[in-house]
Image (tube, rainbow, N blue to C red):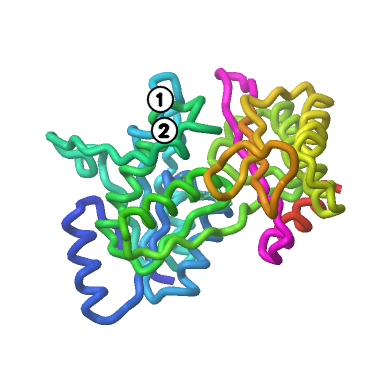
């Protein structure tokens, strides 16, 4: 196995991209904040299978963290990350410093209004502006044919897709199903903050989503019934989500009455952990489209 090339400067990346494109190779991009796990590995393997060159990026982006969030303590295990990238056969990794990404004088902020102001956006002001800014910059630097995003961050993917559509960005965005632990908990770099007690409680999150999925697959379409079921499962474990929303897939508007066609059920759950708190997010797309149906059936199987 060969080690991935490591670039820390924008100029190294763009020179590599130019040479790669001159050879006619296809580039796949996987943007990450590092602390890589099987969820990231799945995105990288998918890119490796669909492109001749895969570039992963590792950058803990300060612009997407609020002042009281975990930017300082976000895990940065670079050696482990490089080993995982090598095992997934990534071609290169771009791991820039903050100064390299945002040199003196950097001013621009990319904003997708409305979609960025609901769900996670209403509790993390400016978060998605930071995500849009860094992702557009990475997409521009990597000039990839395809870029891979996890559906675990459904709202993020939704906003990225809107941004690229509006700005006619040539990179094709590929959504990848959430990778879950055996009990259904969505893999996350933040799961390592959980002590055994919090980890145990956290398994109520996929259970709540799975119960809602079951209702949906059995034909239930009433928003209130689906949402109440999820709330009931969380309450039994004394979990109170920051939000638990059923939203349409056109403009992320709250579903009132019945689901028309399909919708996303998404939540954020703060968990107390020894050194403070950590916030877990998860979601399911309630749809009978075979791709999403398969995801719902997998979740139900893991939680029963
Ligand atoms: P992050 O490092 O958390 O910024 O995530 C980088 C990318 O990996 C994003 O597109 C995430 O949606 C994706 N990702 C993170 N966790 C998972 C997971 N459990 N399953 C699938 N994709 C994931």
In the image, taking residue 18 as reference, residue 71 lies left or right, namely right
Q: Position of residue 241 (x, y in %)?
A: 67, 26
Which residue is under mark 1?
66
Q: Position of residue 138 (x, y in %)?
A: 30, 52
Q: Which residue is at a point 58% across and 47% down the rendered structure image? A: 152
The answer to whether the residue labelled 1 contacts the one labelled 2, judged by CB atoms less than 8 Å apart, is yes
Q: Give me the C-alpha separation between circle 1 and circle 2.
A: 7 Å
Q: Position of residue 97 (x, y in %)?
A: 26, 41
Q: Secondary structure at mark 1?
A: loop
Q: Quadrant of the N terminus?
A: bottom left
Q: Mark 2: few, some, or many residues within 10 Å (few <14, many ≥20)?
A: many
Q: Is residue 32 above or below residue 202?
A: below
Residue 67, magenta (yes or no): no
Q: Mark 1: few, some, or many residues within 10 Å (few <14, many ≥20)?
A: some
Q: Position of residue 22 (x, y in %)?
A: 21, 78
Residue range of the region highlighted in magenta in the rendering: 271-294
The numbered mark at residue 127 is 2
In the image, taking residue 206 as reference, residue 109 lies left or right, namely left
Farthest bottom residue?
A: 23
The numbered mark at residue 231 is none
């Amino acid at each position: 196995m060969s080690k991935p090339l490591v670039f820390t400067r924008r100029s190294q990346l763009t020179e590599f991209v130019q040479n790669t494109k001159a050879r006619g190779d296809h580039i796949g991009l996987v943007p990450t904040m590092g602390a890589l796990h099987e969820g990231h590995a799945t995105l990288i393997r998918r890119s490796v299978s669909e492109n001749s060159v895969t570039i992963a990026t590792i950058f803990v982006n300060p612009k997407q963290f609020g002042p009281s969030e975990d930017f300082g303590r976000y895990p940065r295990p670079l050696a482990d990350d490089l080993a995982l990238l090598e095992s997934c056969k990534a071609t290169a990794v771009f791991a820039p410093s903050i100064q390299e990404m945002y040199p003196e004088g950097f001013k621009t902020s990319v904003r997708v209004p409305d979609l960025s102001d609901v769900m996670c956006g209403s509790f993390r002001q400016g978060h998605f502006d930071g995500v849009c800014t860094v992702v557009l910059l990475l997409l521009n630097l990597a000039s990839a044919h395809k870029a891979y995003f996890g559906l675990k961050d459904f709202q993020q993917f939704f906003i990225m897709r809107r941004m690229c559509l509006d700005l006619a960005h040539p990179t094709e965005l590929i959504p990848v199903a959430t990778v879950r632990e055996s009990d259904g908990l969505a893999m996350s770099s933040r799961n390592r903050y959980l002590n055994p007690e919090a980890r145990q409680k956290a398994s109520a999150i996929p259970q709540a989503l799975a119960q809602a999925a079951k209702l949906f697959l059995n034909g239930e379409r009433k928003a209130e019934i689906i949402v109440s079921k999820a709330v009931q499962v969380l309450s039994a474990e004394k979990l109170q989500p920051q939000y638990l929303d059923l939203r349409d897939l056109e403009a992320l508007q709250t579903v009132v009455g019945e689901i028309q066609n399909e919708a996303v059920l998404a939540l954020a759950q703060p968990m107390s952990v020894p050194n403070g708190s950590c916030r877990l997010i998860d979601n399911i797309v309630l749809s009978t489209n075979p791709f999403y149906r398969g995801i719902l059936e997998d979740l139900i199987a893991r939680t029963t």
